[in-house]
Image (cartoon, rainbow, N blue to C red):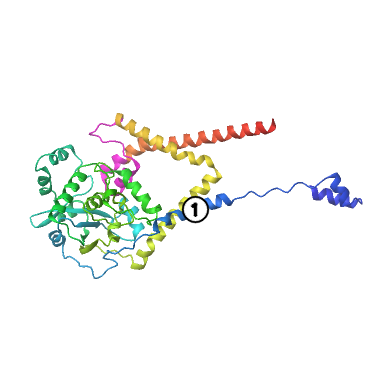
């Protein structure tokens, strides 16, 4: 409009100076600065790569080491297993665990559990939370109960068959433990396997693996957490080893050890591996996978950060989501008996979708979609709507204050 007025007045002989007095040009609008937003988006995109800082490389993996001993059968590996050894396992089909662990390392092996004893010429093994029942806790509290417990644990080849792990690697500490250390090691493992598995600790360990740089010396048995805390597949043996002075990695606490950290540790050496399945990923792609996985996660975080910068009310949605899931847990206790089973959380659902089939899988999905999903999504929507209304209220009050 100003340009049209300028043209008209010049046509009638008015100077620019006169025009400026009659109709001064509008002030130039300041361009909105996006520096802060761009920095936040870039930081979110880069944040998953922080976990690579100071991280040790994979040392023990049969797909990167063609010279690693290959056992002809799982029975041979089972007979070679000694108390104090560690098993790393995998399976060809996908699982929630494999989908969230393997891409961060590039290795197929994602589950860790220790060898605790021997029976009938075979090593025996236990896993975190496997014996989380009052009868086992009562047994190991009695005189001689721990030794009796160990005598009845699964042989390695039995575990492989029962838990559907056809591919197993056997690692051994380079520094052998004394008989006294082995006894203490086994006792701590027994106590830890009779306490609950901790999904919260599993998530926390996963997040630390992604976002925490490995640049500080965190070694030492003093970092051992109490037996009743933080029990997942990798922390259980790591803490038992730490109690005997065997620290898996110097730059991580024993209660934060990730399953694939055993593959990075120079405190262990491979005894051999039993591979029944072919895994076609090339060594080059295995080395690239951690970068690709973190890049994909960073892209997702960057997108979420950008979305929140455009609509800050979105930041309230996770709080409502958590409130809704808490309400679903409480409601589920009233809807279902112990025999029918509780309403699964998202963590359990994802695992069940990979591991379960038929009626069990359908029942789990029905409970989740019928109870937890509506309350969780409803809580997220309510939080978002409430945050939007609060934004509008604050904006109105600011406008009223400026007018006044």
Of 28 and 168, nearer the camera is 28
Res 376 → quadrant: top left
Q: Secondary structure at mark 1?
A: helix
Position of the C terminus, as image quadrant, is top right
Q: Residue furthest top?
A: 334
Residue 339 belongs to the span the image colors magenta: yes
Res 348 → quadrant: top left
Dot 1: few (<14), some (14–19), or many (≥20) neighbours within 10 Å?
some
Residue 216 belongs to the span the image colors magenta: no
Task: For residue 375, say whether it is visible.
Answer: no
Question: As displayed, is residue 13 above or below residue 384?
Answer: below
The residue that label 1 is drawn on is 43
Q: Position of residue 130 (x, y in %)?
A: 20, 45
What residue sits 23% from the left and 68% below the top?
Answer: 68
Q: Position of residue 83 (x, y in %)?
A: 15, 55
What span is in magenta?
Answer: 335-364
Task: For residue 56, say whether it is visible.
Answer: yes
Q: Position of residue 29 (x, y in %)?
A: 70, 48
Question: As displayed, is residue 316 above or below residue 96?
Answer: above
Q: Is residue 186 left or right of residue 345?
A: left
Res 263 → quadrant: bottom left
What residue sits 52% from the left and 45% below the top?
Answer: 308
Q: Position of residue 113 (x, y in %)?
A: 22, 53
């Amino acid at each position: 409009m100003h340009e049209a007025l300028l043209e008209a007045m010049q046509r009638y002989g008015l100077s620019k100076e006169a025009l400026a007095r009659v109709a001064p040009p509008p002030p130039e609008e300041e361009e909105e600065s996006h520096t802060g937003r761009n920095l936040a988006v870039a930081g979110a995109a880069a944040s998953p790569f922080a976990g690579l800082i100071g991280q040790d490389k994979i040392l023990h993996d049969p797909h990167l080491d063609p010279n690693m001993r290959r056992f002809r059968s799982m029975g041979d590996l089972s007979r070679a297993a000694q108390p104090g050894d560690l098993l790393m396992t995998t399976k060809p089909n996908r699982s929630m665990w494999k989908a969230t662990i393997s891409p961060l390392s590039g290795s197929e092996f994602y589950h860790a559990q220790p060898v605790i004893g021997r029976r009938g010429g075979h090593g025996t093994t236990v896993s975190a939370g496997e014996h989380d029942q009052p009868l086992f806790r009562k047994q190991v509290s009695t005189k001689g109960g721990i030794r009796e417990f160990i005598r009845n644990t699964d042989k390695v080849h039995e575990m492989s068959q029962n838990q559907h792990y056809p591919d197993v690697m056997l690692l051994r500490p380079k520094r052998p433990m004394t008989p006294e250390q082995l006894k203490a090691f086994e006792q701590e493992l027994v106590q830890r396997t009779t306490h609950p598995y901790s999904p919260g600790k599993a998530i926390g360990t996963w997040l630390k693996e992604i976002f925490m740089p490995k640049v500080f010396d965190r070694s030492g048995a003093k970092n051992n957490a109490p037996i009743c805390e933080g029990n997942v597949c990798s922390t259980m043996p790591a803490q038992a080893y730490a109690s005997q002075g065997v620290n898996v990695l110097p730059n991580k606490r024993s209660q934060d050890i990730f399953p694939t950290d055993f593959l990075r540790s120079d405190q262990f050496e491979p005894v051999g591996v039993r591979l029944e399945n072919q895994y076609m990923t090339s060594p080059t792609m295995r080395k690239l996978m951690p970068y690709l996985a973190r890049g994909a996660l960073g892209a997702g975080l960057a997108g979420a950060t950008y979305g929140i910068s455009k609509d800050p009310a979105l930041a309230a949605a996770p709080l409502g989501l958590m409130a809704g899931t808490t309400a679903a847990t409480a409601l589920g206790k009233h809807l279902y008996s112990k025999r029918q089973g509780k309403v699964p959380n998202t963590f359990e659902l994802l695992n069940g979708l990979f591991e379960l089939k038929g009626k069990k899988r359908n029942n789990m999905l029905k409970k989740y979609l019928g109870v937890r999903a509506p309350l969780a999504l409803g809580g997220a929507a309510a939080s978002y709507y409430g945050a939007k209304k609060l934004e509008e209220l604050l904006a109105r009050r600011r406008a009223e204050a400026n007018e006044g």
